[in-house]
Amino acid sequence: MTKLLCPSMMCADFSNLKKATQELDQAGIDIFHMDFMDGRFVPNFGMGLQDFELVRSVTDKLVDVHLMIQEPSKYVEKFADLGADIIYIHPEADQQPARTLDMIRQKGKKAGIAINPGTSVEMIQGLLPLVDYVMVMTVNPGFAGQKYLEYTDPKIEKLVALSKEYKFEVMVDGAISPEKVEQLSKVGVTGFVLGTSALFGKTGTYKEILMKLRV
Protein backbone atom coordinates (compact mmCIF):
# COMPACT_ATOMS: atom_id res chain seq x y z
CA MET A 1 0.00 0.00 0.00
CA THR A 2 1.26 3.50 -0.83
CA LYS A 3 2.35 5.54 2.18
CA LEU A 4 1.85 9.29 2.15
CA LEU A 5 4.84 10.79 3.97
CA CYS A 6 4.14 14.32 5.17
CA PRO A 7 6.84 16.38 6.89
CA SER A 8 5.54 18.62 9.66
CA MET A 9 7.07 21.92 8.64
CA MET A 10 6.74 23.27 12.18
CA CYS A 11 9.74 21.03 12.94
CA ALA A 12 11.85 22.21 9.97
CA ASP A 13 14.85 24.54 10.13
CA PHE A 14 13.32 28.03 10.28
CA SER A 15 16.68 29.70 9.78
CA ASN A 16 16.42 28.55 6.15
CA LEU A 17 12.89 27.35 5.49
CA LYS A 18 13.27 27.69 1.73
CA LYS A 19 16.29 25.35 1.65
CA ALA A 20 14.56 22.84 3.95
CA THR A 21 11.48 22.83 1.70
CA GLN A 22 13.55 22.32 -1.44
CA GLU A 23 15.53 19.47 0.15
CA LEU A 24 12.36 17.71 1.32
CA ASP A 25 10.76 18.17 -2.11
CA GLN A 26 13.79 16.64 -3.85
CA ALA A 27 13.87 13.80 -1.29
CA GLY A 28 10.42 12.72 -2.47
CA ILE A 29 7.93 13.69 0.22
CA ASP A 30 4.24 13.50 -0.65
CA ILE A 31 2.51 16.36 1.20
CA PHE A 32 3.91 19.34 3.08
CA HIS A 33 2.03 19.58 6.40
CA MET A 34 1.61 23.01 7.95
CA ASP A 35 0.17 23.73 11.39
CA PHE A 36 -1.68 26.94 12.22
CA MET A 37 -2.70 27.71 15.81
CA ASP A 38 -4.44 30.62 17.46
CA GLY A 39 -3.38 30.27 21.10
CA ARG A 40 -7.04 29.57 21.98
CA PHE A 41 -8.02 26.17 20.60
CA VAL A 42 -4.52 24.95 21.52
CA PRO A 43 -2.19 26.76 23.96
CA ASN A 44 0.47 27.62 21.39
CA PHE A 45 1.09 29.49 18.14
CA GLY A 46 2.19 27.72 14.97
CA MET A 47 3.37 28.92 11.60
CA GLY A 48 2.59 32.24 9.94
CA LEU A 49 1.01 33.09 6.61
CA GLN A 50 4.42 34.15 5.27
CA ASP A 51 5.77 30.67 6.07
CA PHE A 52 2.92 29.12 4.11
CA GLU A 53 3.47 31.45 1.17
CA LEU A 54 7.18 30.61 1.11
CA VAL A 55 6.65 26.84 1.13
CA ARG A 56 3.90 27.11 -1.49
CA SER A 57 6.15 29.22 -3.74
CA VAL A 58 9.01 26.70 -3.89
CA THR A 59 7.16 23.40 -4.38
CA ASP A 60 4.64 21.88 -6.74
CA LYS A 61 3.88 19.12 -4.23
CA LEU A 62 0.63 19.04 -2.29
CA VAL A 63 0.50 21.38 0.71
CA ASP A 64 -2.01 20.93 3.51
CA VAL A 65 -3.01 23.27 6.30
CA HIS A 66 -4.05 21.99 9.71
CA LEU A 67 -6.22 24.67 11.29
CA MET A 68 -5.95 24.21 15.05
CA ILE A 69 -8.03 27.32 15.55
CA GLN A 70 -11.45 28.40 16.77
CA GLU A 71 -13.93 29.21 13.99
CA PRO A 72 -11.82 27.79 11.14
CA SER A 73 -14.49 28.80 8.60
CA LYS A 74 -13.15 32.36 8.82
CA TYR A 75 -9.82 31.25 7.34
CA VAL A 76 -10.84 28.69 4.71
CA GLU A 77 -11.07 31.18 1.88
CA LYS A 78 -7.73 32.76 2.81
CA PHE A 79 -5.80 29.49 2.71
CA ALA A 80 -7.63 28.20 -0.35
CA ASP A 81 -6.69 31.39 -2.22
CA LEU A 82 -3.06 31.08 -1.07
CA GLY A 83 -2.88 27.65 -2.69
CA ALA A 84 -3.56 25.04 0.01
CA ASP A 85 -4.52 21.70 -1.55
CA ILE A 86 -5.99 20.12 1.60
CA ILE A 87 -7.58 21.99 4.50
CA TYR A 88 -8.10 20.27 7.86
CA ILE A 89 -10.47 21.65 10.45
CA HIS A 90 -11.20 20.44 13.96
CA PRO A 91 -14.94 19.70 14.31
CA GLU A 92 -14.47 20.42 18.03
CA ALA A 93 -13.67 24.05 17.16
CA ASP A 94 -16.47 24.75 14.68
CA GLN A 95 -20.15 25.45 15.32
CA GLN A 96 -21.07 24.27 11.81
CA PRO A 97 -18.38 21.82 10.66
CA ALA A 98 -20.50 20.39 7.82
CA ARG A 99 -20.94 23.85 6.34
CA THR A 100 -17.21 24.57 6.64
CA LEU A 101 -16.28 21.29 4.94
CA ASP A 102 -18.69 22.14 2.13
CA MET A 103 -17.02 25.57 1.84
CA ILE A 104 -13.62 23.88 1.42
CA ARG A 105 -14.91 21.68 -1.37
CA GLN A 106 -16.70 24.60 -3.03
CA LYS A 107 -13.26 26.22 -3.31
CA GLY A 108 -12.06 23.15 -5.20
CA LYS A 109 -9.92 21.86 -2.32
CA LYS A 110 -9.78 18.54 -0.48
CA ALA A 111 -11.57 18.62 2.87
CA GLY A 112 -10.18 17.02 6.00
CA ILE A 113 -11.04 16.75 9.66
CA ALA A 114 -8.48 16.39 12.40
CA ILE A 115 -9.69 14.85 15.63
CA ASN A 116 -8.19 15.17 19.08
CA PRO A 117 -7.23 12.09 21.12
CA GLY A 118 -10.34 12.48 23.29
CA THR A 119 -12.78 12.79 20.36
CA SER A 120 -14.66 9.59 19.56
CA VAL A 121 -15.49 8.19 16.13
CA GLU A 122 -19.19 8.40 17.03
CA MET A 123 -18.92 12.16 17.50
CA ILE A 124 -17.68 12.72 13.93
CA GLN A 125 -19.29 9.84 12.03
CA GLY A 126 -21.96 12.11 10.50
CA LEU A 127 -19.20 14.15 8.81
CA LEU A 128 -17.46 11.20 7.13
CA PRO A 129 -19.38 11.45 3.83
CA LEU A 130 -18.08 15.04 3.50
CA VAL A 131 -14.34 14.45 3.88
CA ASP A 132 -11.40 13.28 1.81
CA TYR A 133 -9.04 12.86 4.78
CA VAL A 134 -9.42 12.08 8.48
CA MET A 135 -6.34 12.85 10.56
CA VAL A 136 -6.18 11.27 14.00
CA MET A 137 -4.14 13.23 16.51
CA THR A 138 -2.08 10.69 18.45
CA VAL A 139 -0.86 13.37 20.88
CA ASN A 140 -2.76 16.30 22.36
CA PRO A 141 -2.26 19.00 19.71
CA GLY A 142 -0.18 22.12 20.13
CA PHE A 143 3.37 21.04 20.91
CA ALA A 144 6.02 18.90 19.20
CA GLY A 145 7.98 16.20 21.03
CA GLN A 146 5.15 14.54 23.00
CA LYS A 147 4.65 10.84 23.67
CA TYR A 148 2.39 8.74 21.40
CA LEU A 149 -0.97 8.00 23.07
CA GLU A 150 -1.58 4.28 22.64
CA TYR A 151 -5.28 4.58 23.52
CA THR A 152 -5.89 6.16 20.11
CA ASP A 153 -5.14 2.85 18.33
CA PRO A 154 -8.69 1.36 18.55
CA LYS A 155 -10.09 4.61 17.10
CA ILE A 156 -7.62 4.42 14.21
CA GLU A 157 -8.71 0.84 13.47
CA LYS A 158 -12.39 1.86 13.51
CA LEU A 159 -11.73 4.69 11.08
CA VAL A 160 -9.75 2.45 8.73
CA ALA A 161 -12.79 0.13 8.59
CA LEU A 162 -15.13 3.08 7.92
CA SER A 163 -12.79 4.52 5.27
CA LYS A 164 -13.67 1.67 2.92
CA GLU A 165 -17.34 2.67 3.05
CA TYR A 166 -16.92 6.45 2.96
CA LYS A 167 -13.81 6.62 0.72
CA PHE A 168 -11.47 8.81 2.76
CA GLU A 169 -7.78 8.46 3.64
CA VAL A 170 -6.78 7.86 7.26
CA MET A 171 -3.83 9.98 8.43
CA VAL A 172 -2.01 10.10 11.78
CA ASP A 173 -0.19 13.00 13.41
CA GLY A 174 1.81 13.01 16.64
CA ALA A 175 4.98 11.21 17.76
CA ILE A 176 5.02 9.07 14.62
CA SER A 177 8.24 7.03 14.82
CA PRO A 178 9.53 4.62 12.13
CA GLU A 179 8.06 1.79 14.23
CA LYS A 180 4.65 3.49 14.27
CA VAL A 181 4.77 4.01 10.48
CA GLU A 182 5.38 0.30 10.02
CA GLN A 183 2.79 -0.79 12.60
CA LEU A 184 0.01 1.58 11.49
CA SER A 185 0.50 1.05 7.77
CA LYS A 186 -0.18 -2.65 8.37
CA VAL A 187 -3.47 -1.65 10.03
CA GLY A 188 -4.42 0.37 6.93
CA VAL A 189 -3.34 3.94 7.72
CA THR A 190 -2.40 5.79 4.53
CA GLY A 191 -0.68 8.98 5.67
CA PHE A 192 1.90 9.88 8.28
CA VAL A 193 2.81 13.34 9.53
CA LEU A 194 6.52 13.18 10.33
CA GLY A 195 8.25 15.38 12.88
CA THR A 196 11.12 14.88 15.29
CA SER A 197 10.26 11.21 15.99
CA ALA A 198 11.08 10.03 12.46
CA LEU A 199 12.46 12.74 10.18
CA PHE A 200 13.88 15.97 11.54
CA GLY A 201 17.19 15.90 13.43
CA LYS A 202 17.83 12.27 12.49
CA THR A 203 21.00 10.70 11.07
CA GLY A 204 21.12 10.49 7.27
CA THR A 205 19.72 12.55 4.43
CA TYR A 206 16.00 13.15 4.06
CA LYS A 207 16.04 10.88 1.02
CA GLU A 208 17.67 8.01 2.96
CA ILE A 209 15.24 8.38 5.86
CA LEU A 210 12.19 8.46 3.57
CA MET A 211 13.36 5.42 1.61
CA LYS A 212 13.58 3.41 4.85
CA LEU A 213 10.12 4.56 5.93
CA ARG A 214 8.60 3.48 2.60
CA VAL A 215 9.80 -0.13 2.91
Image (cartoon, rainbow, N blue to C red):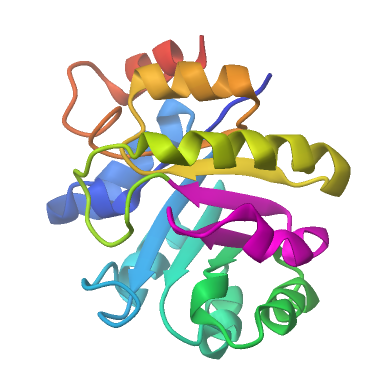
Q: Position of residue 79 (x, y in %)?
A: 53, 76
Depicted 110 relative to depicted 60: above or below: below
Q: Quadrant of residue 53?
A: bottom left
Residue drawn at x 48%, y 16% as measured from the top left: 182
Q: Position of residue 36 (x, y in %)?
A: 36, 70
Residue drawn at x 59%, y 17% as measured from the top left: 186
Q: Viewed as shown, does residue 25 lie left or right of 99?
A: left
Depicted 108 relative to depicted 197: above or below: below
Depicted 93 relative to depicted 191: above or below: below
Q: Quadrant of residue 164?
A: top right
Which corner quadrant holds the N terminus? top right
Confirm whether the magenta stretch covers residue 128: yes
Q: Residue furthest right?
A: 165
* 141 and 124: which is toward the camera: 124
Q: Which residues are magenta?
A: 111-137
Q: Position of residue 155 (x, y in %)?
A: 57, 42
Depicted 65 relative to depicted 61: above or below: below
* 196 and 80: which is toward the camera: 196
Residue drawn at x 16%, y 31% as measured from the top left: 201
Q: Position of residue 142 (x, y in %)?
A: 27, 62
Confirm whether the magenta stretch covers residue 14: no
Asked whether residue 111 is in view, the answer is: no
Q: Quadrant of residue 147?
A: top left
